[in-house]
Amino acid sequence: MKKIMGLILGTISLFGANYTEIPDQYATDIVIESPKISANITTDDSRRYVGQAVGFSVSINGSPVPVVKNRFDITIPLSQLGQQIHTLTFTKNNDTITLSRPFIKLKNPNNQSLSQNELAFINTRYASPKIRSSELNTVFRRSELAFFLSELSNSKPQQKTVTIANRATLPYPDAIQSVVNRGILSLTATNAFESDATINRLVLIASIIKTLDVAVSTSVYPSVAAYKGTWVYGYLNTALDMKLLTNSDIPLLKTPINHATFIQIASRLPHVQSDIQQALTLPQQAVVQKKPTLPSKTLEKPSVSQGKPPAVRIESVDASSSFAKKIIGYTNPNVSFVVNWSRITSDDTGQFNVLIPIDMNDVSFHFDNGVIRKELPPIRSKKP
């Protein structure tokens, strides 16, 4: 019997299982008290693992963890932002149990007030290395703006190659060259790029609208009436249309902004929402067996059927504005799903409609039991 039980318990290492929760057979010997498995998005600059390991040695990502009187307590610094996995390995004789703890590290906002989506924006390709590494109250400068605009405009053809006199000294020479070539940002009379110049809300929204080639709005907002007759009036109305600015931003239009304000405004763009969603998605290795039960009378590996996600059919794609388009489609069977971090519910017939950025050419539909990616047909009609 002892030999048989050894073979049964050994199936953990035999099949190379990688779990998110401790198998029932070891629930009294191995306990992870902190962090909880649900604590998978954090702004903390360290991650503390506390628990019990009776008779097991412990390592995290291959580094041994001290176990004293069957207890472990270790704090791991988190120096990198983004999607990460800590792999906890418990070993005793021939038994090895590997637990995955996937999580997402967002920037610690300290004294700045930013939402989870705004912090996730920092983990996307739109945020420069300086945005990632600096405090959020750091003054936002023109070089960081150029980096952002180069990512926002990477599908826009370059008009010509412009000689930048101080290119060799610039922090992001390729990004700056790109936006200068595209005519988005300009040079001085001596063909130099002013990388250290401060940026205000007005310059930021005008640059974004110019980069995206958004048609200037004809809407009228009383909050910007004082600017009527100036070159900025159309940009301000367009920014209010796009919800890049709110009425509370208007009195501060010419005040230099910091990194936090830039992030708050830039993360409102529909064009960056899919990247933000991806930044808040756990690594794929997280999708593994959850609290498995080992076989008691056989060494055969159990098969698990998770079912298939519903069928998705795209009926039409229409422009709803100069910066967004509406998808109408059907799911079968009729269930809810997530697109761009928003929960969508179909009607009784399975029909749904969802707004996405106008430059998105494919969409991922996230169901509870899987993901379906759909290439979108061309826009059926243009918004006048």
Image (cartoon, helix red, strand yellow):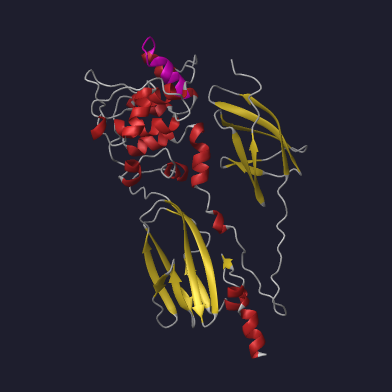
Q: Please count the marks in the image.
A: 0
Position of residue 161 relative to residue 112, above or below, is: above
Q: Quadrant of residue 229?
A: top left
Q: Main secondary structure of the magenta part?
A: helix
Query: What x and y, as percent, mark residue 363?
Result: 61, 37
Query: What x and y, as percent, mark residue 15?
Result: 62, 71
Q: Where, quadrant-wise, is the C terminus in this rendering?
A: top right
Residue at image coords 69%, 70%: 301
Position of residue 8 relative to residue 41, above or below, is: below
Residue at image coords 46%, 73%: 51
Q: Do we see residue 74 in this rendering?
A: yes
| Between 16 and 90, the one nearer to me in the picture | 16
Query: What x and y, as percent, mark residue 332?
Result: 76, 42
The verdict on residue 25 being magenta is no
Position of residue 253 relative to residue 54, above or below, is: above
Q: Do we see residue 257 in this rendering?
A: no
Q: In the shown orientation, is residue 167 left or right of residue 382? A: left
| Between 191 and 116, the one nearer to me in the picture | 191
Query: What x and y, as percent, mark residue 126?
Result: 42, 37
Q: Single out the residue that lies furthest toward the top.
A: 229
Q: Single out the residue that lies furthest toward the bottom.
A: 1
Q: Where, quadrant-wise, is the N terminus in this rendering?
A: bottom right
Q: Give the residues drawn in magenta, as a range.
A: 228-240
Q: Quadrant of residue 379?
A: top right
Residue at image coords 53%, 67%: 99
